[in-house]
Image: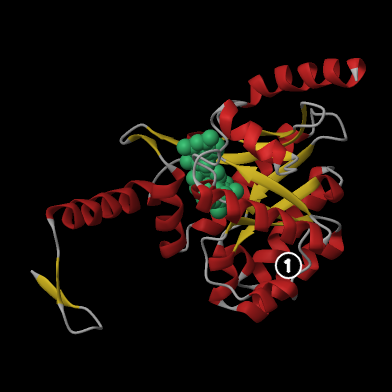
Amino acid sequence: QGKRSNRGQVQVFTAEHVIAIEQNNQIEQVLSRADLEAELTVFFQPIIDVREERTVAFEALARWNSPELGRVSPDAFIPVAERTGQIGTLTCILLKKALAAAGAWPDDVRLSFNLSTHDISSSDGVTTIVGIIMSSGIDPRRLDLEITETAMMYDFVQAKTSIDVLKLLGCGIALDDFGTGYSSLSQLHALPLTKLKIDRSFVSDLHKNPASYKIVKSLLALSQDMGIGCVVEGIETSEELDALKKLGGVLVQGYYYSPPVAENETGKFLSESDAARKAG
Ligand code: C2E
Ligand code: MG
Ligand code: MG
Ligand code: MG
């Protein structure tokens, strides 16, 4: 079975395409009748300030453990939930769980939470999010909300309005996966961003790939010019970390320090950080 692409060539569906479509259908079916409150959990990945080796934040990352499908990656089920409209329910459950975990951390440790396209594409979506934050008891100034260029492009005017509301509430606004989307710099400039997160595709082999090195260097410079923070995602090796430090990078998230961990493991990073704070 073939499909005409816009360039007029025939694009052939391969076996992998068919398998991917079937997997998505299966995820959609199982997700629609899942007990999300019970099956969804949140893992947390530390974001480290490399100058003091201190955990300054955790990014909340969704985990779905389905009795039928086993562990499903958020890269697989979040887009399905976006398409079916179930994402609103998912976001509520995940945000509440993430905020509850953050309640146990010291006040100077931030929580970073991923918002989806849907969450910022309607005034209802953002109203719900504001309500959850307000009733959590967590100071909104401890929160960073991560958005992507793709999410902004769906309806820029509504998305910007939503972001402005969340910024007014006191939340930080982080642009996630920076460099992989298609937004124009002038549009980005219109957003009240407080952080850039450099996508990990630019980071692998930072120490020996001149192209990656130049991109990370210029994105760090851009964030400095904008007067905002910059988190470098996906640092896996000490070579990459050293190269990044030489470039003046400060905030790092990646397997080198830690993969995402369960809520009950976040404490150990904070006590290690406490020790570093006292020693420094
Ligand atoms: P993201 O927001 O860019 O999150 C970073 C992803 O990179 C996470 O994958 C994390 O586990 C992974 N990662 C971090 N450090 C390294 C590293 O050193 N090496 C490698 N190979 N990977 C690393 P994860 O948890 O599978 O999440 C994938 C994506 O799913 C996220 O990308 C985000 O776009 C989406 N997502 C996750 N949780 C949520 C959520 O609660 N809501 C929404 N809307 N999206 C979410
Ligand atoms: Mg993220
Ligand atoms: Mg990212
Ligand atoms: Mg990503």
Residue 254 in the image: x percent, y percent?
58, 34
Residue 12 in the image: x percent, y percent?
13, 67
- Camera-side residue of 42 and 185: 185
* Residue 37 falls left or right of residue 251: left
- Camera-side residue of 7 and 271: 7
Residue 264 in the image: x percent, y percent?
65, 21
Residue at 77 percent across and 22 percent down: it is 270
* Residue 150 falls left or right of residue 170: left
- Camera-side residue of 269 and 67: 269
| Image vertical order of residue 13 relative to residue 51, above or below | below
Residue at 63 percent across and 73 percent down: it is 122
Residue 125 in the image: x percent, y percent?
64, 65
The picture quadrant where one finds residue 64 is top left
The picture quadrant where one finds residue 56 is top right
- Camera-side residue of 245 and 163: 245
| Image vertical order of residue 267 relative to residue 178, above or below | above
Color style of the picture: secondary structure
Residue at 63 percent across and 33 percent down: it is 241
| Image vertical order of residue 40 relative to residue 190, above or below | above
Q: Residues within 10 Å of mark 1 (few under 14, many from 20)?
A: many
Q: Secondary structure at mark 1?
A: helix
Residue of label 1: 163
Question: Residue placed farthest to the left in the image?
Answer: 1
- Three-letter amino acid code at disc 1? Ile
Residue at 23 percent across and 83 percent down: it is 7
